[in-house]
Image (tube, rainbow, N blue to C red):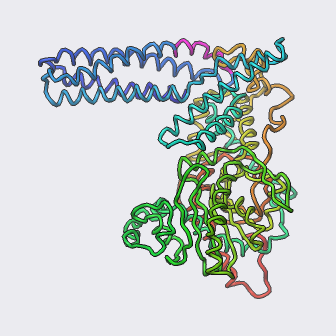
Amino acid sequence: MTSSSRLPLSFSLGWIGILVLYSIHKGQLDCPGGKLLHSYLLVLLILLVAIICALSSILHISMQGTISNPGPRKSLPKLLYLRLALFLPELLWAIVGAIWVSDRSIKCDRTVMNAIFGTVIASWIIIIFTIVAVVVVFDPLGGKKTLYLTGCPNHNLESSQSDQVFYNVKKTATRVWEKRIRLLCCCIVQNDDHRVAFTSIAELFRSYFSDTDLVPSDVAAGLTLLHQEQDKVENCPKDPEEVLIQSPLSPTADDLDLEIENAAHYMKFAVATYGWPYYIMTNPFTALCKLKGDCCRNSPVEADIVGGDRLNMNFGSILKITGLQYRDFIHISFHNKIFEIPFFVALDHKKEAIVVAVRGTLSFEDILTDLSADCESLTLEDILENGLVHKGITQAANYIYRRLINDGILNQAFTIAPEYKLVVVGHSLGGGTASILAVMLKNSFPTLKCYAFSPPGGLLSKSLADYTKQFIVSVIVGKDVVPRLSMPNMEDLKRRIIRIVANCNRPKYQILLHGCWYEVFGGDPNNFPTELDGRNQDALTQPLLAEESLMVHRSPSYNALIEDESPLNSPLRYPRLFLPGRIIHIVEENSTRRWCSSDVKYHANWSKETAFGNILISPKMVTDHMPDVVAKALNSLAQESVSCISCQPQGDFSTNTV
């Protein structure tokens, strides 16, 4: 009820504003048509009072009980229906107000007319916000969940009947999710690829949310509780054996310094693919001035730029970030569609390499590519059989592979520099695409290397991930959520959220308020207990709102929490996919800061893919993924490594940690 808890405040402010407006201009409404405006303000005040009373009652009731014990909130549906009933006169009166304000026969003072016109606009903004909130939050499948559970074979339905019930519910749920996705992507020109992606993503969301009965604020409360639980675990001293298991010494640890230096060098190619948005973000005050000269200059490789902007700002940014010359670029593509992402091919004379750099997520089309997370088989001759990969990212890699090979781009590059090696790099979506592209190119280019910065977690099956350790290095910073994103990890996160909110005996508003304070200012995670002193089966099994039948027939969202068969131990519904190659994990040293900005020190070590088997909740789970943060960490480590080597006595070799 977080949205409804904010509405009383906004309506109260609106009521106060209109009351002040009415008091100030009441004497100025003695004009032709002024009675209409007087009536509009008076009725609007009465409506707002009724709405504020209804919303305040909703807020008071929603603060009762706990997330898994909605019994004290059993009167909430009636109040919601009351608020819905008030919406109709609110809408009608907003229409009346718009008509009266636009009536030219009303000859009142201009200041009065402007003030009332602003009131009408504010009313329409509130109405539109309410409609959007209802569309986003409302679950049209709520009434069908009972059918879904009562239709199972354990409840005396014939097998054919239960199968039909399941099929109808799944089909309806997929259709609802598909409509939501289409609405969010309404500004995108849609083709067959988009429709296929919408259906695939809708099916994925339907499968993921089919067995949950949580609203967004429940999820927010669960995430903040999980963060505190994870901080408790981090603060506990670890046994030496456990530390060794989590940070294993790698047989390739001796080349950690070299790989960090290479990664720091190639990271500038990965971030350059983002073009002018990244350059302006990192140089907010000087970027436009620096780009001005390059934007107005005609480049000699203009014919090799596909889909560039008129002012060449993207290309100018790439030049500034990489430090290369015009002649060093073989091909640049800014073409961006679903499963078709931008990339460029350039000559890196410093490392004697032909670099293929792939852009990460920067558009709605890229997001759809990310979310097309089904698995498909990738068969490589003489190497592997039936290796599983991320479907959407694999299609993006196939697109770039066809461009590089079929269009002769790599052939052109090696004609210019035949002695150079091939290096493929990318960040985020670009890192995942670069990894799969490197797998496709490895047979043709045996010396190929790939650097994947913050790649998505659900990318390769175990056999493929092990194979890529020969030529791929992944770089991950801190608690970055993207390398930990996979369907099994998301399923695990969902189950943990359900368990922790069911076991918490605090009201939701207390959880959220304490969570906001904890995220911003920190504190002791032990100050806010999250477990019930004793598991109360009756409390955990009370129905959510009016869905008694959902709980009677054992909702997997709550009832399983009180049984020995925990959903945390249930079999996975999705194949487990892993990060590519060898993994360098970079973390901050003794970082306790939250929102303050200060210089930090990093250290890095080799890590196993199993270390990223669960999602860590943290304020930095998103910021650690940002390309500028990754670049800063790598540059800091590379500079520290160089300074250590310069002052290190001969014969003293570096350890596996930087």
Give the vertical position of 379 relative to 512 (above or below). Answer: below
Res 192 seen here: yes
Q: Is most of the magenta stretch helix, strand or loop?
A: helix
- Could you say which quadrant of the image residue 151 lies in? top right
Give the vertical position of 106 relative to 440 (above or below). Answer: above
Q: Quadrant of the C terminus?
A: bottom right
Q: Is residue 164 left or right of residue 99?
A: right
Q: Position of residue 316 (x, y in %)?
A: 45, 69
Residue at 63% across, 60% down? 400
Asked if the stretch drawn in magenta spans residue 73, the answer is yes
Q: Position of residue 152 (x, y in %)?
A: 80, 18
Q: Nearer the viewer, residue 582 or 20?
A: 582
Magenta-highlighted residues:
69-80
Q: Position of residue 521 (x, y in %)?
A: 56, 47
Q: Is residue 534 left or right of residue 637?
A: right
Q: Is residue 275 left or right of residue 161?
A: left
Residue at 75% across, 39% down? 492
Q: Position of residue 343 (x, y in %)?
A: 58, 62
Q: Quadrant of the N terminus?
A: top right
- Could you say which quadrant of the image residue 649 lies in? bottom right
Asked if the stretch drawn in magenta spans residue 243, the answer is no
Res 586 seen here: no
Q: Nearer the viewer, residue 154 or 240?
A: 154
Q: Nearer the viewer, residue 655 or 592?
A: 655
